DNA sequence: GCCTCACATGGTAGCGCTACCATTTGTCTG
DNA sequence: CAGACAAATGGTAGCGCTACCATGTGAGGC
């Protein structure tokens, strides 16, 4: 006779313990916890009492194994420290905090291959939904997303061909709007300064370029970029490079706010008047843009809302009513400030 | 006769499929994947070929259920957008990216009760290790940590009574060092400006106070705090309040760098000379501190390293050799810059 | 040649939960 | 009052994997 294996779980109460204590079948406990409406009032109370007394917490692993579906949202972002993604992730967490869903974050480090690998790993858990940043998945990653068997939301950008659902805005339009604003303000030699240059930055650049070409003012020497990750200090350096290359520069549209802040600091240090000699526009509109002196014009994006909206869409798809609107454009807003007011 | 339940997993290959294809037992496949050394060279190759061909990825849920141990690191932080924690988390991710361990992040929102709730949830998965921010757990949370049955690393701070292991530094000493530096630089009416005021900020404040009292210069009216979350714009507002309360202020030690930047901007806006009229010291030394104009003195903390070190300690504890040094103090470094150079 | 022992491999029995189906009970119809 | 049917509950059989033990094999010692 084989003795039952010693409790591996370290003596944690199981559903069977609860069932015994409440004097019901294990299934009824399971149901009482997941679909309370299908269990009579009496039993439900009785079971809840047993759960509380024993301190029972269901094992999510066993649950996932038995139901072939883990209560997990897989989230793939290219960076954890970039404030922009941190805000999206915060939106996701806040929207999911009262739900039974856990969150599993993957950091792709801006690499398509790493994204593909993580998708493979995430897929093995059969997540309830997947939220991925960007629309430029590798063909392999795209296939994994299509076969994930769960709702998928691509966030940060909108584009023509969603895997499933999308929440974001047009980075091209954002870039164009920023450049047009500088043009309207009377700036002419308007540079583009960009770090990292991920696909979204590329599209902002393309928008900038479209505006400059439309005005007949485009010149490739106006563009200064680097694949190095963005930072305030990098903004300073890139601005120096840009000025060295094109000393008559009178405006800059920056890839993002960190870069813009670096540019502003360098201007102050070099006694270049902002906005008189140089106009500056950032991107994302972090809190500090409105506080800096001078305050910096920036393109406000709705990062937190992207996170909350993505979750809302995924949840309703899980619940069975797929949103009629599969692509949600949350837009952006140009915030005009002192740095371009001349 | 009962027909086998239709494959819930959506047709994903299982370990049995691999075993069949490789012509071995399922156990041997399992071993080949987890302890390659215990399977002969030949079989290992054969099995690997079958795995590749089928695209087999082990189901982490089944694995966790069978082995009573999930390959998950639970990480509890009070904020996802605060750059400081984002860097710690990044360190954790980077250190774990080549390991089989997944990461589960919980956002406590600076709430002890929420921390306790999350610990309960995390515990139900039987994680391989837990990393929690801070040393001020509620008694309930502390009990959960002690009974977690896995290595626990408290990060960000050091203190006398670790649950298990600790990596961080003394916020008290950091605060004192900052204040002493301002005193040495000749400032006298040195204010403390703090937002959020979580336990770590409280200890920085205590360090500041100790230094000021030692110098015979402490005055409660020098302290301006708020429970509101920190931001650059808040730094500006708090500085205004501080000045209104104490117009002769000649220095400020800020809770963190965001606040310090806000103070700097407000000084520029109000034509207050930094460092002549006001000296400014921040905390954490974010990248922008060295770039701003004037550059801002700050207490550099080793956030990324806290993350990597915590993982290293947890991993070696999992491997069975608990580090002899259970409390690791990574210290901090005062970065003297223009904002206090008068 | 027998015994011991390490090494390689496999079979069986669960881990804790839920899908599926069966059973029981009560209620409503005609 | 039989028959139909919904609601409430339970039993059984896995989900995919690994712990535990058993078995087989060959090397080495005496």
Image (tube, coloured by chain):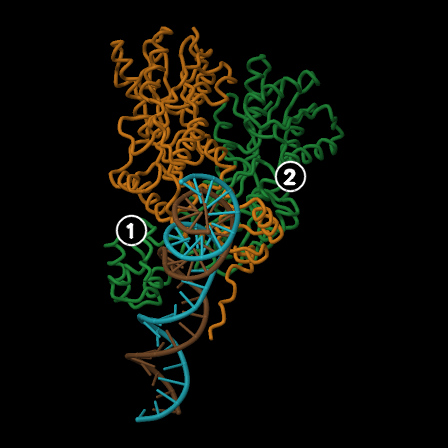
Chain colours: A green, B orange, C brown, D cyan
Task: Judge from the rendering whether residue A257 lies leftward or rightward of residue B182; answer left or right.
Answer: right
Disc 1 to disc 2, C-alpha distance: 58 Å
Residue lying at 55% horizontally and 13% vertically, measured from the top left: A269
In front here: A78 or A186?
A78
Do callouts 1 and 2 point to residues on the same chain?
yes
> Can you identify the residue that label 1 sits on?
A11
Q: Residue A27, located in which quarter of the rendered image?
A: bottom left
Determine the secondary structure under disc 1. loop
In front here: A150 or A316?
A150
Q: Residue B307, located in which quarter of the rendered image?
A: top left
Whether pointer 1 and pointer 2 mark residues with C-beta atoms closer than 8 Å, the reply is no
Task: Judge from the rendering whether residue A92 lies leftward or rightward of residue B191; answer left or right.
Answer: right
- Where B208 sits versus B24, above or below? above
Q: Chain of mark 2?
A: A
Q: Number of numbered discs present?
A: 2
Residue lying at 66% horizontally and 30% vertically, measured from the top left: A184
Q: Chain of mark 1?
A: A
- Residue A315 appears in the picture as rendered: yes
Residue C15 position in % (x across, y down)? 36, 55
Determine the secondary structure under disc 2. helix
- Residue A316 appears in the picture as rendered: no
- Where D22 sits versus B265, above or below? below
Residue lying at 37% horizontally and 26% vertically, measured from the top left: B168
Which one is earlier in the sequence, the residue at label 1 or at label 2?
1
Count residues near mark 2 (Cα–Cα under 10 Å), then give few for <14, some for 14-19, many for 20+: some
> Can you identify the residue that label 2 sits on?
A173
- Where A78 sits versus A271, above or below? below
In front here: B37 or B163?
B37
């Amino acid at each position: 006779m084989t003795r039952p294996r010693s409790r591996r779980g370290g003596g944690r109460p199981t559903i069977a313990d609860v069932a015994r204590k409440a004097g019901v079948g294990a299934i009824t406990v399971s149901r009482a916890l997941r679909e309370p409406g299908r269990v009579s009032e009496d039993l439900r109370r009785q079971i809840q009492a047993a759960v509380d007394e024993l301190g029972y917490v269901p094992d999510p692993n066993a649950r996932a194994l038995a139901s072939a579906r883990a209560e997990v949202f897989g989230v793939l972002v290219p960076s954890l420290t970039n404030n922009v993604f941190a805000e999206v992730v915060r939106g996701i967490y806040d929207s999911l905090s009262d739900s039974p869903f856990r969150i599993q974050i993957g950091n792709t480090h801006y690499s398509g291959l790493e994204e593909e690998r993580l998708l493979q790993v995430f897929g093995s858990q059969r997540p309830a939904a997947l939220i991925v940043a960007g629309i430029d998945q590798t063909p392999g990653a795209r296939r994994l997303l299509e076969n994930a068997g769960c709702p998928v939301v691509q966030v940060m950008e909108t584009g023509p061909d969603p895997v499933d659902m999308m929440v974001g805005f047009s980075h091209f339009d954002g870039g164009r709007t920023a450049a047009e604003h500088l043009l309207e303000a009377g700036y002419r030699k308007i540079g583009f300064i960009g770090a990292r240059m991920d696909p979204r930055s590329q599209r902002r650049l393309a928008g900038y370029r479209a505006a400059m070409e439309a005005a007949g003012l485009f010149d490739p020497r106006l563009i200064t970029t680097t694949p190095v990750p963005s930072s305030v200090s990098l903004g300073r350096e890139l601005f120096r490079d840009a000025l060295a290359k094109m000393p008559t520069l009178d405006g800059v549209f920056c890839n993002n706010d960190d870069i813009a802040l670096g540019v502003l600091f360098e201007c102050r240090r070099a006694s270049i008047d902002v906005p008189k000699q140089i106009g500056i526009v950032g991107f994302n509109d972090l809190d500090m843009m409105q506080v800096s002196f001078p305050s910096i014009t920036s393109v406000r994006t709705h990062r937190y809302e992207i996170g909350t909206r993505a979750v809302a869409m995924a949840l309703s798809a899980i619940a069975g009513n797929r949103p009629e609107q599969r692509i949600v454009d949350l837009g952006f807003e140009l915030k005009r400030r002192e740095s371009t007011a001349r």
